[in-house]
Image (cartoon, rainbow, N blue to C red):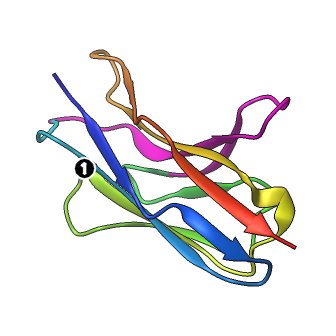
Amino acid sequence: QVQLMESGGGLVQAGGSLRLSCAASVSIFSIRAMGWYRQAPGQQQELVARIVTIGTTDYADSVKDRFTISKDGAENAVNLQMNMLKPEDTAVYYCYLDAGRPGVYWGQGTQVTVSS
């Protein structure tokens, strides 16, 4: 069974930076995309950033020019560099991996808290 292991959340002041990492526990033959969603209390889950197999990246408008998603060497690992963090970035961040037919896998979530 595929598990996604996340790390890097925490507490930071506004304007600071954090780096999230996510890696799958096993090699996956065909990955369509990997990325991060987030969910703040009382809010719907939203896509933060993703990278697809051809290298294309997508970002939520609210994080463009502040967040950067990248592969971490292996095909089944990604990082999310978050700069110029704002209090509204506070949320639980979930890594996901879209493996196509086998399905979509999710991490357990990591808390990011940005204080003003």
Q: Is residue 59 above or below residue 100?
A: below
User: Which type of secondary structure does the marked residue at label 1 adopt?
Assistant: loop
86 and 13: which one is in front? 13
Q: Position of residue 2 (x, y in %)?
A: 20, 28
Q: Position of residue 75 (x, y in %)?
A: 23, 55
Residue 69 falls left or right of residue 116? left
The residue located at (30%, 38%) in the rendering is 31
80 and 88: which one is in front? 88
Q: Return the residue at label 1.
A: 76
The residue located at (84%, 32%) in the rendering is 43
The residue located at (75%, 66%) in the rendering is 114
Q: Position of residue 97 (x, y in %)?
A: 38, 36
The residue located at (75%, 55%) in the rendering is 90
Q: Which residues are magenta?
A: 29-50
Question: Per the image, is 86 magenta?
Answer: no
Question: Per the image, is 42 magenta?
Answer: yes
Q: Amino acid at mark 1?
A: Asn
The quadrant where residue 10 appears:
bottom right
